[in-house]
């Protein structure tokens, strides 16, 4: 029994110690919290709640949650050893969340981002209609506001209790990424332990940059399924972040202590593409090349010449030179409303 | 036909429902059921199979190439199962490796470049889950295929022939019209896989099949499939030619509708279709905010910058970790 001081009102785990599953060390809970839930003796990364992720990654006080009210409904009447509704309720009580994902707008080192975070404790972080809808809205808001999108995944995959509706979330979360590409908006995927199944087989594998936490389990099929299917020994370190790095499917494996810094650097290095609003690009100073100043001059001269002789340098042409056009419109509100209405029936 | 989804409250599937669902699964897996290459010669002319993903190899579990549909060039892509042990080994039982999906991507890009409508046939238990597939990026291959199809600038007609199994099916299954043969099934995970995770026993596959509502008519009710294509009386396996005729008619009527749309309309309609899939409720509940200054100690601590007292309320106070790494729940 942990000793409780009458004046301490700390919320949190009531057990004072946690055993590290990697090195069997007993870690004092408060120490674990202070070390960002990384085992001080072996560096094992424990899973984090959404709250802890937000505190870790975002500038204090910058996060505004969006679409907090979305809730799953049991469209299939799914019942295994208990109804889907009961599982949802148990997870809600356990985590204080409505579903396995929270999204909103926040700042990482001053950079405004649309960020979505999974919680694995809510039905294994599984992606059903609510998670898919929130992700799609997260990407669409990134598109409309022209800010980068960041998703921190921790999920077993698609939620079986919603059947093929869950499977369709793979396409629903992937479709907006095509629009982000066209609009020149970066998307950073952060894969944490575990990221498997349908989540990895959709948006999580499609980050412009994919960052993973050390030793995180990342794979398509469960390791047990894989070994059952082929009946052979799996390679060591199979389906870890490091395995994916070695095979070219992850860009960076970053320890949690450096995660925020790394994201901030990526956001600095990969800014949202400048919008072409029809004006010809301003030929400012060109930092590269010895002929920089000269070519800038030539361009100004060219502009003057074209003006005098009346050549139309129209927006179409400028756009054709590799600058993205204005972003496509997000879908009409009617689409979402239709879904809600259908859902209520 | 509309045997499902009228019941909303969750109850375990009845023995009759289990029987009905399992019958469909067995028909969908019937050894004589027409496969992609059985139907293609009846529907198209001059089908020319193209091979290889230009990166690693050729996967016989996915076939594809250009063909003529009533004289018009189209791109045909489909899963291909075998009919006997030998051909099933060659085809890996219709379960593609990443190179299969990458071959499909290559063909989709070619169709996009030349403006050919795409017709795909789904018939797989799922993407292959072995270590070789993982090493070569099975998940990435599926994700990239899905992404490519959501933005493809030509009409896509998807036909669910037999088994529409999970991500391996969806990888070539994103379309403007998704049609399913009467006795086909479509699911997020195989009934065996679902049973072993949720019922902890593969023997409950029949129950899982009923619970997942994977039959074609049920999929129409969910909005995942647009329409059912009727099969000959005893099932598609009894008459391949007759099945091909109805499939062809369905493809032609879908294409007639889709080719009348311009590219922007086509893409916005496809986006809206995908965007509308799913069932949820918006309770309108407001955003969560971290609790403000819960105790006197905190309040004073914040003012005096005492060590160990965060200056602002923290999100981990409302969404804390309970200290356990829960392994019980899993997805597909």
Image: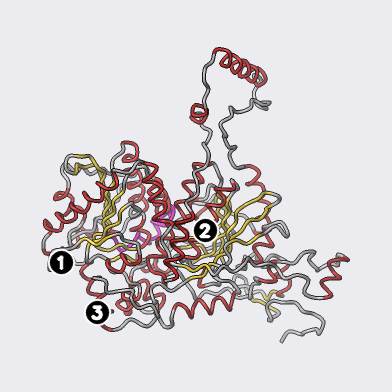
* Magenta highlight on residue B132: yes
Q: Nearer the viewer, residue A134 or A215?
A: A134
Chain of the residue under label 2: A
Which stretch is magenta?
Answer: B123-141
Estimate the spatial distance between the alpha carbons at disc 3 and disc 2, rounded to whole Å: 37 Å
Estimate the spatial distance between the alpha carbons at disc 2 and disc 1, rounded to whole Å: 40 Å
B16 up-or-down from A212: above or below: below
Q: Are marks 1 and 3 in contact (CB under 8 Å)?
A: no
Chain of the residue under label 3: B
Q: Are marks 2 and 1 in contact (CB under 8 Å)?
A: no
Mark 1 lies on residue: B235
Secondary structure under badge 3?
helix
Locate residue A40, reporting x and y percent. Answer: 70, 67
Name the image quarter holding the N terminus of chain A: bottom right
Mark 2 lies on residue: A135
Locate residue A229, reporting x and y percent. Answer: 35, 66
Q: Determine crowd level at label 1: few under 14, some 14-19, many 20+ residues with C-alpha closer than 10 A.
A: some
Name the image quarter holding the C terminus of chain A: bottom left
State left or right for residue A51 relative to residue B40: right
Residue beneath the point at 22% across and 50% down: B253
Chain-order first, disc 1 or disc 3: 3
* Magenta highlight on residue B53: no
Q: Nearer the viewer, residue B18 or B57?
A: B18
Chain of the residue under label 1: B
Say yes or no: labels 1 and 3 on the same chain.
Answer: yes
A265 up-or-down from A51: above or below: above
Tag of residue B19: 3
Locate residue A59, reporting x and y percent. Answer: 71, 56
Taking the view exactly as shown, the residue that stands out farthest to the bottom is A1
Q: Nearer the viewer, residue B93 or A77?
A: A77
């Amino acid at each position: 029994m942990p000793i409780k001081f009458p004046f301490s009102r700390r919320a949190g785990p009531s057990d004072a110690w946690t055993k590290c599953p990697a090195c069997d060390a007993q870690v004092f809970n408060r120490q674990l919290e202070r070390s960002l839930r990384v085992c001080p003796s072996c560096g094992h990364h424990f899973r984090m709640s959404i709250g802890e992720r937000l505190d870790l990654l975002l500038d204090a006080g910058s996060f505004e949650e969006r679409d907090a009210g979305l809730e799953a409904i049991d469209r299939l009447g799914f019942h295994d050893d208990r109804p889907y509704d009961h599982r949802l309720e148990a997870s809600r009580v356990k985590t204080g969340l409505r579903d396995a994902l929270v999204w909103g707008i926040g700042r990482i080192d001053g950079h405004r981002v649309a960020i979505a975070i999974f919680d694995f404790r809510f039905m294994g972080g599984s992606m059903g209609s609510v998670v898919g809808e929130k992700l799609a809205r997260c990407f669409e808001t990134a598109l409309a506001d022209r800010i980068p999108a960041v998703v921190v995944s921790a999920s077993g995959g698609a939620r079986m209790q919603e059947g093929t509706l869950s499977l369709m979330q793979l396409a629903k979360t992937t479709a907006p990424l095509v629009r982000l590409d066209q609009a020149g908006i970066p998307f950073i995927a952060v894969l944490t332990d575990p990221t498997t199944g349908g989540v990895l087989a959709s948006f999580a594998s499609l980050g412009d940059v994919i960052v993973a936490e050390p030793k995180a389990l990342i794979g398509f099929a469960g390791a047990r399924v894989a070994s059952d299917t082929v009946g052979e020994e799996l390679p060591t370190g199979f389906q870890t972040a490091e395995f994916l790095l070695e095979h070219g499917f992850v860009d960076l494996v970053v320890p949690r202590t450096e995660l925020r810094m790394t994201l901030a650097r990526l956001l600095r290095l990969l800014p949202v593409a400048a919008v072409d609003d029809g004006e010809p690009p301003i030929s400012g100073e060109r930092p590269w090349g010895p002929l920089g100043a000269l070519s800038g001059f030539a361009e100004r001269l060219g502009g003057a010449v074209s003006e005098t002789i009346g050549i139309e340098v129209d927006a179409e042409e400028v756009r054709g030179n590799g600058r993205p056009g204005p972003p496509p419109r997000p879908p009409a509100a009617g689409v979402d409303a239709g879904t809600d209405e259908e859902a209520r029936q | 036909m509309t045997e499902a989804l009228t019941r909303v409250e969750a109850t375990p599937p009845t023995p009759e429902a289990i029987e009905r669902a399992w019958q469909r699964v067995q028909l969908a897996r019937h050894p004589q059921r027409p496969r992609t290459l059985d139907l293609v010669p009846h529907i198209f002319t001059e089908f020319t199979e193209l091979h290889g993903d230009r990166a690693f190899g050729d996967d016989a579990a996915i076939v594809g190439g250009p063909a003529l549909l009533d004289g018009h060039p189209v791109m045909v892509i489909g899963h291909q199962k075998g009919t006997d042990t030998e051909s099933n080994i060659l085809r890996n039982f219709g379960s593609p490796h990443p190179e299969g999906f990458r071959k499909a991507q290559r063909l989709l890009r070619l169709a996009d470049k030349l403006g050919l409508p795409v017709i795909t046939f789904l018939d797989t238990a799922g993407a292959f889950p072995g270590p070789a597939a993982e090493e070569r990026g099975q998940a990435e291959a599926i994700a990239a295929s899905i992404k490519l199809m959501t933005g493809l600038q030509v009409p896509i007609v998807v036909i669910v022939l037999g088994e529409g199994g999970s991500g391996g099916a969806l990888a070539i299954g994103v379309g403007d019209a998704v049609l399913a043969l009467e006795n086909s099934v479509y699911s997020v995970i195989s009934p065996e896989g679902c049973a072993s995770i949720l019922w902890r026993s593969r023997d409950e596959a029949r129950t899982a099949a009923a619970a997942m509502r994977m039959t074609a008519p049920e999929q129409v009710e969910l909005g995942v499939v647009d329409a059912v294509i009727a099969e000959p009386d005893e099932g598609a396996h009894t008459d391949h030619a007759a099945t091909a005729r109805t499939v062809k008619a369905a493809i032609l009527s879908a294409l007639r509708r889709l080719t009348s749309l311009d590219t922007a309309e086509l893409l916005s309609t496809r986006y809206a279709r995908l965007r509308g899939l799913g069932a949820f409720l918006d309770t309108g509940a407001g955003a969560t905010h971290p609790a403000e200054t819960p105790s006197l100690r905190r309040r004073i601590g914040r003012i005096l910058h005492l060590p160990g007292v965060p200056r602002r309320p923290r999100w981990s106070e409302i969404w804390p970790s309970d200290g356990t790494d829960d392994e019980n729940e899993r997805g597909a």
